[in-house]
Amino acid sequence: MLSCGNCGLSVTAEKKVKHQKNGNVHEYIYYRCTKKRKDFRCLEPAITQNKLANQLASLLADYAMPTAWASKLETMLAKDEQKASEASKDFIANAEARIASLQSKLQRLLDGYLDQDIDQQTYRAKQAKLMSEKKSLEEKVSKLTLASNSWIEPMRNWISFASSISKIAISCEPVAMKQALLQIEGLNLFLSNKKARLKPRAFSYSPQKNHWSALRAALFSAAARPSEKLKSPILVPREGFEPPT
């Protein structure tokens, strides 16, 4: 998860045990560069686990969604879910009615052919046209049934996780912080002069390409305007030249 800011190699943990003359034993965990480059002498110093954990918690806090934002997003999500459900139900109902009508036409067409009211060439041409429309509608209904709300649960899970980050950062529990940091896309963490630093990967500079980047940008924007700290300009953007949604 961490690389050395001096030579670029991985950072590893090392346990050291100190025995005192009075019999007490103390264990310390340090994080340091693996220093395995033969062509480079890395002088990056080690850092204790507690100090590193505190620094990572501070970095993690930059991605913690405020409870007020999470609540607002949940409300918006519920409305979107309801709208999507209603829209898909209307489309599916209309499509199924059209499919039933096409099936009825296919049956009448077959009856006309069997009764020799229409020739084979005409029958084949009309059958192909009706079957093509029927199959197209059936595929659309199938896809819509599966995908109409496919984004809802991932979004809901993300909101829940993002709003829980503050608790993870406060707890400073190493395993929980590691899992949280690994879920945040685009992070490039490195250790330099005994300090954990963050350099976003190139693609994550764009909020449109990385929702974590967008959240962090909104948090910094809100922090710069304390009187509006519970409002995010990214949460509900103003209409511009783009089509309204």
Image (cartoon, rainbow, N blue to C red):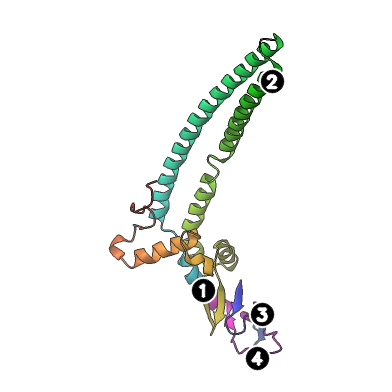
Of the numbered discs 4 and 1, the one sitting upstream in the chain is 4
Query: In what element is the residue under mark 3?
Result: strand
Of the numbered discs 3 and 1, the one sitting upstream in the chain is 3
Q: Residues within 10 Å of mark 2 (few under 14, many from 20)?
A: few
Q: Are marks 3 and 4 in contact (CB under 8 Å)?
A: no
Residue drawn at the location 47% of the way across and 38% of the way down: 84
Q: Between 189 and 160, which is closer to the camera in this rendering?
A: 189
Q: Which residue is mark 3?
A: 14
Residue drawn at the location 63% of the way across and 22% of the way down: 126
Query: Could you say where residue 149 lies in the image, as x and y percent from the top left?
Result: 53, 41
| Residue depth check, mark 1 versus mark 2: number of the one nearer the observer | 2
Of the numbered discs 1 and 2, the one sitting upstream in the chain is 2
Identify which amino acid the numbered label 1 is placed on.
Lys
Question: Magenta part of the protein: which range?
Answer: 28-52
Mark carried by residue 121: 2
Q: Which residue is mark 1?
A: 199
